[in-house]
Amino acid sequence: MTGTIVALNSTVCDIRFEEALPALFETLVLELPGRTLTLETRRQLDAGHVRAVALGSMQGVKEGMAVRRSGARIRVPVGEETLGRLFNALGEPIDGGERAFGTYREVFNPSLGVSEQGGSAAIYETGIKVIDLLAPFIRGGKVGLFGGAGVGKTVLLMEFIFKSVALHHGVSVFAGIGERIREGHELYAQMLQAGVMEKTVMVFGQMNEAPGLRYRAPMTALTISEHFRDALHQEVLLLVDNIYRYIQAGQEISTLLGRIPSRVGYQPTLSNEIAELEERIASTPGGSITSVQAVYVPADDITDPGVASVFAHLDTSVILSRAYAAKGLYPAIDPLESHSKLLDPLVVGERHFNVAKAVKETLVAYRELQDIIAMLGMQQLGPEDRLKVMRARKLEKFLTQPFMVTESFTGRPGRSVALADTIAGCEKILSGAMDGVDESRFYMIGGIDEADL
């Protein structure tokens, strides 16, 4: 059955059908010279017309062209054949390799029911000191990396891929949404060089592509992850860079579909769209999906409605600080703003909880004294306060760490530090055992033993 394009607006088409209308989210096919354009039905206007979003370039599309119904929704390849491959949001390979796959799966799947979900509140160790100590990841949980432009979100995500393969022997699925393809190519080249690409799948909805493709990219990556979890019973690390671009793509589509905008111009369906995506990220007794999502914070405003809509779904929030980046403290994670639901003595144990609490209390005391230090100097502080400041500065530096992915830029070998070593190191600093060691010795090291060398 075919329809006819009767109106065009940017990447949206109104199409007339004389017979039955296509279902919502059904794909439509438009044959153009030298290529095929896929459209997705998003709205039924009346008894004879639908509004569809183009999943590709609209160049060459005109009124009066015939559009064919496919009778199906978007289906993407899944399974072990996808490992080491790069795909677009439609599941088409973009790496020049084999284009035929044995198993396909529809991208629209309901979230798991409560009875189907499983797993326990266990720590997913990353080997990154500040995260494992103060904002531990939950195995099968959802993590948000919040930060403005240029504070290190993408570098952290790249490091998690390396850690996933090295520490957990799992599968990584990377979704690049609305980001520069140059960055994606660099990531691909680095992963090939490091030998981890064979356990990774990459899905891209590029910055220059239609909003429909950028909007579908995380769904494609999630569908591939679900197959590894359900059919192959594997531990999957799903990385999304950047979830805010997904929100923006939905905002563009909503405007083109003629919906009245909500707060700050966001789509009125914002909360629902985020929930549809986030609630599919879950664990079963046989496998897990641990998701790490970079969230761009516009103008460093953490209260922006687009950013705030993601918070409700997260188990761990990691806040990247421009002030820490300016001081050269990398990863530039704010240890006081970042938090995790897992940081509970019943889950992580009394020792871990008490050390994390003492570290935060010491850093809070240092932050409160910074104005006095700036105006009057350290000499005006009492002996007890001077000791707190000295230990806080050592803790700040000890919680920095060189990454595997930055070795070629910094010349510093990357470090992966076990949680037990991080706790032991912080205990030594807090107890005063390291008071005689210069604070510069703690900067960009692994375990605390390196400060004594």
Image: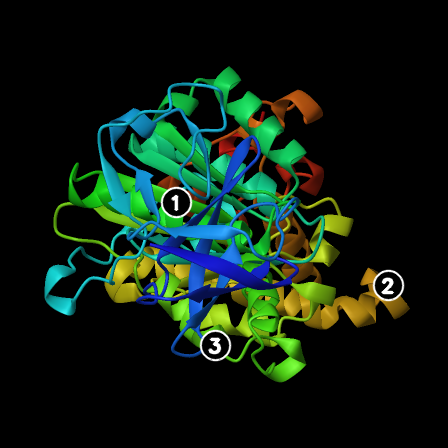
- Reading the image, the residue beneath label 3 is 269
Look at the image and tell me in which quarter the C terminus lies. Answer: top right
Q: Secondary structure at mark 1?
A: helix
Neighbours of disc 2 within 10 Å: few (<14), some (14-19), many (20+): few
Q: Nearer the viewer, residue 137 or 174?
A: 174
**How far apart are the alpha carbons under marks 3 and 1?**
22 Å
Q: Report which quarter residue 138 is drawn in.
A: bottom left
Q: Report which quarter residue 277 is drawn in.
A: bottom left
Residue at 62%, 54% in the rendered image:
391
**In the picture shown, does residue 318 fall above or below 235?**
below
Please state the horizontal and vertical placement of residue 201, each as a whole percent of the image.
Answer: 39, 33
Task: Answer with mark 2 or mark 1, whichever residue precedes in sequence.
Answer: 1
- Of circles 2 and 1, which is in front? 1
- Residue 65 shows in this picture: yes
**In the picture shown, does residue 308 fall above or below 197?**
below
- Reading the image, the residue beneath label 2 is 377
Identify which amino acid the numbered label 2 is placed on.
Gly
Identify which amino acid the numbered label 1 is placed on.
Ala
Look at the image and tell me in which quarter the N terminus lies. Answer: bottom left
**Label at residue 221:** 1
